[in-house]
Image: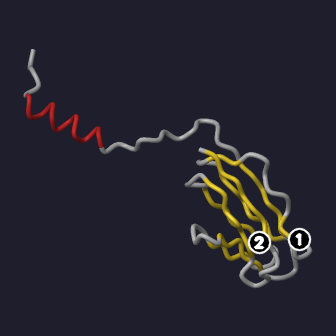
Amino acid sequence: MRLISRRTMLAILAGMSFAPAVAARADTQLHVIEIDKMKFGAAPAEIHVGDTIVWKNIDLVKHTATARDGSFDIDLPRKSQDSMIVKTPGTVEVYCRYHPGMIMTLVVTA
């Protein structure tokens, strides 16, 4: 039987200390937010870190889903969609760069 040296054990433990502190949730959700008639659809009631948001532009003009805090900026040509994975908790105001009156608020929990 071979024993692990003290140096090897310390290296293993040091490496483990740099592992991610937050584990991903196993039950992530998919949320679809439609953009139509110059409006964002209703924000999902519950959004968690790790969930996916699909931004679906069914309008006849180009839009964006842009976070005021700069955490995301999704360009959505007419009749297109794109998705993102939610990475951080908090409250984020979202607006369209082309139509600044289009706003919504997302509340993300850990």
The answer to which image quadrant residue 43 occupies is bottom right
Q: Amino acid at mark 2?
A: Ser
Which class describes the residues within 10 Å of circle 2: few (<14), some (14-19), or many (20+)?
Answer: some
Q: From the viewer's perspective, is 74 left or right of 2?
A: right
- Decide which of 101, 37 is in the foreground and name it: 101
Q: From the viewer's perspective, is 21 left or right of 63?
A: left
Q: What number is the disc on residue 20?
A: none
Residue 66, image x and y in percent? 67, 73
Q: Furthest-right residue in view?
A: 37
Q: From the viewer's perspective, is 79 left or right of 11?
A: right
- Which residue corresponds to mark 2? 80
Residue at x 92%, y 74% (from the top left corner):
37
Residue at x 56%, y 55% (from the top left corner):
87
Above or below, 103 relative to 33: below
Number of residue marks:
2
Above or below, 20 relative to 4: below
Under tag 2, what secondary structure? strand
Q: From the viewer's perspective, is 72 left or right of 20?
A: right
Q: Furthest-bottom residue in view?
A: 98
Q: Nearer the viewer, mark 1 or mark 2?
A: 1
Which class describes the residues within 10 Å of circle 1: few (<14), some (14-19), or many (20+)?
Answer: some
Q: Quadrant of the N terminus?
A: top left
Q: Amino acid at mark 1?
A: Asp
- Which residue corresponds to mark 1? 36
Above or below, 45 relative to 75: above
Under tag 1, what secondary structure? strand
Distance between mark 1 and mark 2 Cα atoms: 11 Å
- Decide which of 16, 82 is in the foreground and name it: 16
The answer to which image quadrant residue 42 occupies is bottom right
Q: Quadrant of the C terminus?
A: top right
